[in-house]
Amino acid sequence: MRNLKSPIRSPIPKLGSPIPSPMPGLQKLPQCTRCCNGIVGTIVKARDKLYHPDCFKCDDCGVNLKQRGYFFIEDNLYCETHAMAHVQAPEGYDVVAVYPNSKVELV
Ligand SMILES: [Zn+2]
Ligand SMILES: [Zn+2]
């Protein structure tokens, strides 16, 4: 008898997704190198790294580098001023710099 006597057993019918993933779709987004969030819309691509347009800025002073050219030192992104400051590294320090005439690719 109690079997038939539960009219409201599950208030929410099977409309929810059976996939337990909390944010489906987010994982498909390209990930911003700086803030590690998914990028929706315009992507700034520099070398093999992807950034939000707003995240594409100097590590030191935060100036946006999209229009200015960018420098990579190791995996950090700098404006010219701060790239120069960091390039004064000890001899043998492996510095990889990308010069301002490098094209920024907007995807
Ligand atoms: Zn970002
Ligand atoms: Zn800077």
Image (cartoon, rainbow, N blue to C red):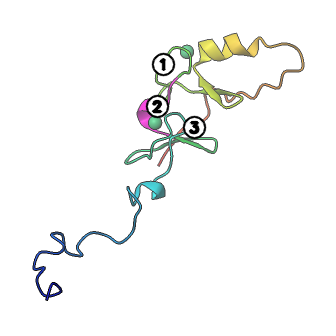
Q: CA distance from mark 1 to mark 2?
A: 9 Å
Q: Which residues are magenta?
A: 51-57
Q: Residue at 57% across / 19% down in the picture?
A: 79
Task: Assess disc 1: are there few (<14), some (14-19) or many (≥20) residues with their C-alpha within 10 Å of its C-alpha.
Answer: some
Mark 2 lies on a secondary structure that is helix
3 and 1 marks in contact (CB < 8 Å):
no
Residue where numbered disc 3 is placed:
103
Q: Residue at 19% across / 74% down in the picture?
A: 13
Q: Nearer the viewer, mark 3 or mark 1?
A: 1
**Mark 1 C-beta closer than 8 Å to ligand 2:** yes
Residue where numbered disc 2 is placed:
55
Q: Residue at 40% across / 45% down in the picture?
A: 42
Which numbered disc flags the more N-terminal residue, 1 or 2?
Answer: 2
Residue where numbered disc 1 is placed:
62
**Mark 2 C-beta closer than 8 Å to ligand 1:** yes
Quadrant in which the N terminus appears: bottom left
Please, is residue 4 above or below residue 76 in the view? below
3 and 2 marks in contact (CB < 8 Å):
no
